[in-house]
Image (spheres, rainbow, N blue to C red):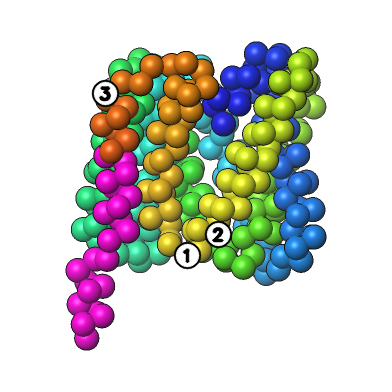
């Protein structure tokens, strides 16, 4: 998404318009896809929660994140945001009773260290940027924990559409006051559509489907691939340099994912019984 966003910004799009287009276009597309495939609807009892997940949870995360970038460097904000896998594991233990396995804790250390190397250890910012970035991490952690409780694998597509459209309402309200800045070039339009489809429709649907299968802790660990994919995309498409720290960080992130996928000792003992 950052690669597409840079192209969209260069065409004259502002942040509010980009996020409005992302959620509104993505939500409509996913709703039509869910209707065409006759995807099961989530239970009516979960609709208010799904609505709040989009309207408050995801909007709050994106608002805090993008506002933090005005008060701190991008690398510092990204590092603080990626505190969320640790928060998800701890909150999952406290709220959902998920077990703190040795594999998950070791995988978390590898993934976090890898993110630090990939994103970079340097960064400057005042207390407002740090606080907003940590708020974004907390909001996203709660979003993942709550989603894992209310979004089922069978209803992942319809639930994703519900959440995305709910998030678009927030940016519709913001756009009414701030106005919109539409893309002025064909590449800007294509980048906005790519964010709506690849970074929203595909991302939300696959994340929720996976969340129902592997749980919130492992899903958050898998998400640490995001900065690695972003940096490698920048190397491939924007000509940025590939450094030793990026390579080492990539190995650590992948190692963390492999460790998280290994069966725990407790699981092995239960199988032996």
Q: Contact (CB < 8 A) between labels 1 and 3?
A: no
Q: Earlier in the sequence, mark 1 or mark 3?
A: 1
Say whether disc 3 or disc 2 marks the residue closer to the N-terminus.
2
Q: CA distance from mark 1 to mark 3?
A: 34 Å
Q: Which residue is mark 2?
A: 209
State which quadrant residue 60 falls in. Answer: top right
- Find residue 187 and report its image quarter: top right
Report, in whole angstroms, how far the alpha carbon at label 3 lies from the one at label 2. 34 Å
Closer to us: 148 or 11: 11
Q: Is residue 246 above or below residue 140?
A: above
Residue lying at 26% horizontally and 54% vertically, measured from the top left: 259
Residue at the disc numbered 1: 213
Who's the residue at 43% across and 44% down the image? Answer: 223
Instruction: Look at the numbered disc 3 and give the secondary structure of its residue.
Output: helix
Image coordinates of residue 211 in percent, x first then y, are: 49, 58
| Rendering coords of residue 180 (x, y %) | 77, 21
- Classify the position of the N terminus by image quarter: top right
| Residue 7 image position (x, y, % from top left) | 63, 19
Label the magenta part by its dominant secondary structure.
Answer: helix
Residue found 40% across the figure and 48% down from its top: 222
**Residue 254 magenta-drawn?**
yes
- Residue 144 in view of the camera: yes
Residue visible at 70% across and 53% down in the picture: 162
Q: Quadrant of the C terminus?
A: bottom left
The span from disc 2 to disc 1 (Cα, nearest Å) is 7 Å
Mark 3, mark 2: which one is toward the viewer? 3
Secondary-structure class at tag 2: helix
CB under 8 Å between callouts 3 and 2?
A: no
| Circle 3 residue | 244
The span shown in magenta is 252-273
Whether residue 88 sits left or right of residue 158 in the image: it is left
């Amino acid at each position: 998404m950052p690669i597409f966003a840079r192209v969209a910004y260069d065409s004259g799009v502002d942040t509010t318009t980009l996020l409005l287009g992302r959620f509104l276009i993505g939500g409509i597309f996913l709703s039509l896809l869910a209707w065409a495939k006759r995807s099961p609807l989530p239970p009516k009892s979960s609709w208010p929660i799904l609505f709040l997940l989009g309207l408050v949870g995801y909007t709050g995360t994106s608002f805090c994140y993008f506002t933090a970038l005005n008060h701190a460097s991008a690398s510092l904000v990204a590092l603080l945001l990626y505190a969320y896998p640790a928060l998800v594991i701890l909150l999952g233990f406290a709220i959902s009773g998920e077990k703190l396995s040795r594999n998950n804790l070791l995988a978390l250390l590898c993934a976090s260290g890898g993110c630090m190397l990939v994103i970079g250890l340097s960064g400057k910012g005042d207390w407002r940027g740090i606080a907003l970035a940590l708020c974004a991490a907390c909001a996203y952690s709660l979003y993942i924990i709550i989603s894992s409780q209310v979004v089922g694998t069978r209803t992942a597509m319809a639930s994703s559409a519900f959440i995305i459209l709910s998030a678009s309402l927030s940016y519709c309200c913001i756009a009414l006051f701030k106005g919109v800045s539409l893309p002025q070039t064909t590449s800007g339009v294509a980048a906005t559509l790519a964010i709506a489809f690849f970074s929203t429709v595909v991302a939300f649907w696959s994340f929720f489907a996976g969340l129902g299968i592997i749980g919130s802790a492992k899903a958050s660990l898998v998400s640490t691939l995001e900065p690695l994919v972003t940096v490698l995309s920048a190397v491939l498409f924007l000509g940025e340099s590939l450094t030793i720290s990026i390579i080492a960080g990539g190995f650590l992130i992948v190692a963390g994912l492999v460790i998280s996928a290994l069966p725990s000792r407790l699981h092995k003992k239960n199988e032996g019984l």
